Amino acid sequence: MHYTIEQTEAFARWRARIKDLVAATAIRRRLERAQHGNLGDVKAVGGGVSEMRVDVGAGYRMYYTIRERSVVFLLVGGNKSTQAADIRQAQAMAQEI
């Protein structure tokens, strides 16, 4: 199965702020694998939102929801230190999509 990946503006801004080139590359590769159907290390966090974990650097997290079984909406991103707030924000955004 292939997924269409769409980003919210909040996700795109978060991703653009990542200065760690190793982490930015790991995130890009992770999203490429997800597009080809390999979501990898994920965990449901409630409210129709799941978390993709990227264990590089600060322990990056990407929050997403799936619609129509084929469209992945990247809602927000963060790291382990902002996890609780990021989950709340992603759950609110998922309700709006």
Image (cartoon, grey):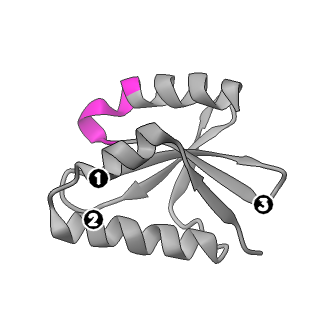
User: How much space separates mark 3 and mark 1, taking CA atoms?
Assistant: 25 Å
3 vs 1, front mark: 1
Q: Is residue 16 left or right of residue 44?
A: left
User: How much space separates mark 2 and mark 1, taking CA atoms?
Assistant: 9 Å
> Who is closer to the viewer here, 24 or 82?
24
| Residue 24 in sight from this viewpoint | yes
Instruction: Return the residue at label 3.
Output: 70
Residue at 73 percent across and 56 percent down: it is 71
Numbered mark located on residue 24 in the image? 2
The reply to whether the magenta stretch includes residue 2 is no
Instruction: Return the residue at label 1.
Output: 16
Q: In the rendered structure, which disc, 2 or 3, sits on the residue that comes first in sequence?
A: 2
Q: How many marks?
A: 3
Q: Secondary structure at mark 2?
A: helix
Q: Quadrant of residue 85?
A: top left
The N terminus - image quarter: bottom right
Range of magenta residues: 78-85
Q: In the rendered structure, which disc, 2 or 1, sits on the residue that comes first in sequence?
A: 1
